[in-house]
């Protein structure tokens, strides 16, 4: 039987088939790839970098003293009209006198008439508002009120400016901190006992901003007094985020306040997380009674009241009103906030020290400091980074809360918390003074939290499914 002839064909191997479908990545490269796939975490990382640039580069570009006062623009909102008209300096005003006829001087038992003809004696400006009206028969004088809201709904007349008691005077000049805004002036007659009538006359007045030639030269708006023509309109200093109740630039204060808030929010966590890493590493590696003793002390530290120690440290440092409380705040955070990081690192060390490569290193004669520094702490870096990322917003919020209640950074040193404390006093009339620092605190805390969530997913191999979505 003839043997069957066997034929072989040469196999052709394509070069592309020998190339791996996906190149091998290191742990860091793979973590970075998964972090970039998380859009929220990546956007938060960019926001953190933008905040750092706002803090470091911002004051170099916006060279405005955060404590300098612009008295022409107090509590000015962003985008407000900055124009001012140059006028002559204020001159005394004699007022308007209208003596009553003899028959009209009789005292009325009860005044039922409001001053008629309430009007402006001349156009109102930020120098003065001059009012005049017709006399009320039987009135012994007049009371003038000013409000920034219309008093008609609930008869809230506002701030009582003065009682006009000079016989025959039917005018009043207001020079009390007039801002370029709308005011409501109310005038009521007084009876012979000095009681105000229940009826009143109200006038809505829009005060325009004016400035004298000398003020224009002093503020650098014109070169010389001769260049400042009466009636000329000039533009005041730009404040992109407006000013506060003292006329200080909010953008400059937010930049310098970010230095304080982010310094506390980054440096304090770095210190107490480092302390927690060392403490947890020693407890986890030592084990046994040493571990139990160390962790019971950590439990004791957790039980200590933070606010009470903050007060004690302020007394110890001699912090008084007007002094910044950065040092006692940092000390309180470092001494009382490390147990959380210590517990996490201890748990990781307890798990890692049972791994085979650690046992092999021990058999080869590796010392304790080598095992901790070479194998254990590097393998807990993911937990440490995530803990640090979550600790930063907690520290920022703590600083804002303490400064808000007056226990942290005190004015005039700006911080976001102290700015919120100042802004809440004028939140109904000038909300921008509270909104801007509150928004910066919220964005910073949210960005760090989302970044920490993304880092946790990227650094934990068990979370790959979430990071790749």
Image (cartoon, rainbow, N blue to C red):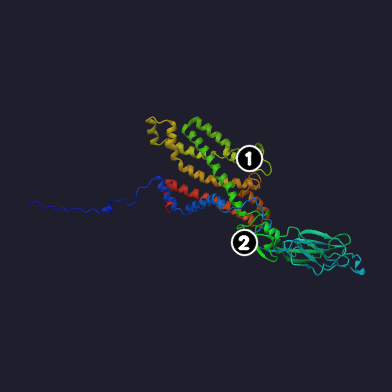
Q: At which x and y percent is residue 212?
A: 71, 61
Q: Does residue 87 appear in this view?
A: yes
Residue at x-position 18% and y-position 53%:
10
Residue at x-position 38% and y-position 33%:
361
Q: CA distance from mark 2 to mark 1?
A: 40 Å
Labels 2 and 1 touching (C-beta < 8 A): no
Q: Is residue 259 above or below residue 107?
A: above
Residue at x-position 92% and y-position 69%:
103
Q: Earlier in the sequence, mark 2 or mark 1?
A: 2
Q: At which x and y percent is residue 268?
A: 56, 42
User: Mark 2 sits on what residue?
Assistant: 79
Q: At which x and y percent is residue 54?
A: 55, 52
Q: Is residue 130 above or below residue 459?
A: below
Name the element at disc 2.
loop
Name the element at disc 1.
helix
Which corner quadrant holds the C terminus?
A: bottom left
Q: Nearer the viewer, residue 368 or 92?
A: 92
Is residue 190 found left or right of 126 in the rendered image? right
Q: Nearer the viewer, mark 2 or mark 1?
A: 2
User: Mark 1 sits on what residue?
Assistant: 310
Q: At which x and y percent is residue 401?
A: 62, 47
Tag shown at residue 35? none
Q: Nearer the viewer, residue 252 or 223?
A: 223
Q: Nearer the viewer, residue 122 or 420?
A: 122
Total labels drawn? 2
Q: Is residue 271 above or below residue 93?
A: above
- Image quadrant assignment for residue 223: bottom right
Is residue 80 found left or right of 361 in the rendered image? right
Is residue 22 found left or right of 198 in the rendered image? left
Q: Does residue 466 appear in this view?
A: no
């Amino acid at each position: 039987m003839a043997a069957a002839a066997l034929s072989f064909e040469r196999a052709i191997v394509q070069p592309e088939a020998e190339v791996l479908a996906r190149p091998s990545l290191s742990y860091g490269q793979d973590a970075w790839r998964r972090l970039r796939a998380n859009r929220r975490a990546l956007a938060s990382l960019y926001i953190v970098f933008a905040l750092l640039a706002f803090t470091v580069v911002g004051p170099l570009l916006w060279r405005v003293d955060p404590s300098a006062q612009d008295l022409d623009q107090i509590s000015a909102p962003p985008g407000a009209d900055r124009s001012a008209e140059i006028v002559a300096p204020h001159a005394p005003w004699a007022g308007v006198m209208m003596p009553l006829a003899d028959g009209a001087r009789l005292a009325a038992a009860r005044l039922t008439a409001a001053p008629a003809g309430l009007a402006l004696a001349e156009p109102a400006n930020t120098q003065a508002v001059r009012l005049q009206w017709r006399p009320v028969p039987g009135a012994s004088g007049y009371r003038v009120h000013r409000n920034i809201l219309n008093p008609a709904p609930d008869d809230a007349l506002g701030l009582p400016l003065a009682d006009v008691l000079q016989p025959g005077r039917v005018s009043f000049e207001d020079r009390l901190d007039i801002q370029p805004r709308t005011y409501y002036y109310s005038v009521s007659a007084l009876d012979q006992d000095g009681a105000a009538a229940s009826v009143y006359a109200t006038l809505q007045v829009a005060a325009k901003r004016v400035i004298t030639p000398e003020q224009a030269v002093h503020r650098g708006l014109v070169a010389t007094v001769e260049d400042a023509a009466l009636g000329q309109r000039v533009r005041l200093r730009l404040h992109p985020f407006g000013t506060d109740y003292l006329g200080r630039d909010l953008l400059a204060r937010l930049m310098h306040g970010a230095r304080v808030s982010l310094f506390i929010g980054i440096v304090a966590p770095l210190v107490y997380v480092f302390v927690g890493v060392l403490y947890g590493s020693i407890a986890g590696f030592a084990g046994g009674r040493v571990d139990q003793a160390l962790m019971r002390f950590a439990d004791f530290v957790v039980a200590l009241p933070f606010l009470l120690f903050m007060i004690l440290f302020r007394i110890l440092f001699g912090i008084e009103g007007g002094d910044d409380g950065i040092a006692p705040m940092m000390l309180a955070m470092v001494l009382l906030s490390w147990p959380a990081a210590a517990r996490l690192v201890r748990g990781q060390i307890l798990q890692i020290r049972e791994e085979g490569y650690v046992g092999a290193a021990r058999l080869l004669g590796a010392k304790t400091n080598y095992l901790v520094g070479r194998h254990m702490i590097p393998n807990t870096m993911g937990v440490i980074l995530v803990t640090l990322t979550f600790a930063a917003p907690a520290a920022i919020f703590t600083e804002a809360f303490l400064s808000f209640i007056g226990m942290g950074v005190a004015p005039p040193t700006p911080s976001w918390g102290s700015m919120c404390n100042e802004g809440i006093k004028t939140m109904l009339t000038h909300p921008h003074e509270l909104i801007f620092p509150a928004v910066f605190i919220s964005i910073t805390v949210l960005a760090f939290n989302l970044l920490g969530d993304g880092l946790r997913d990227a650094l934990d191999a068990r979370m790959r499914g979430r990071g790749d979505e």
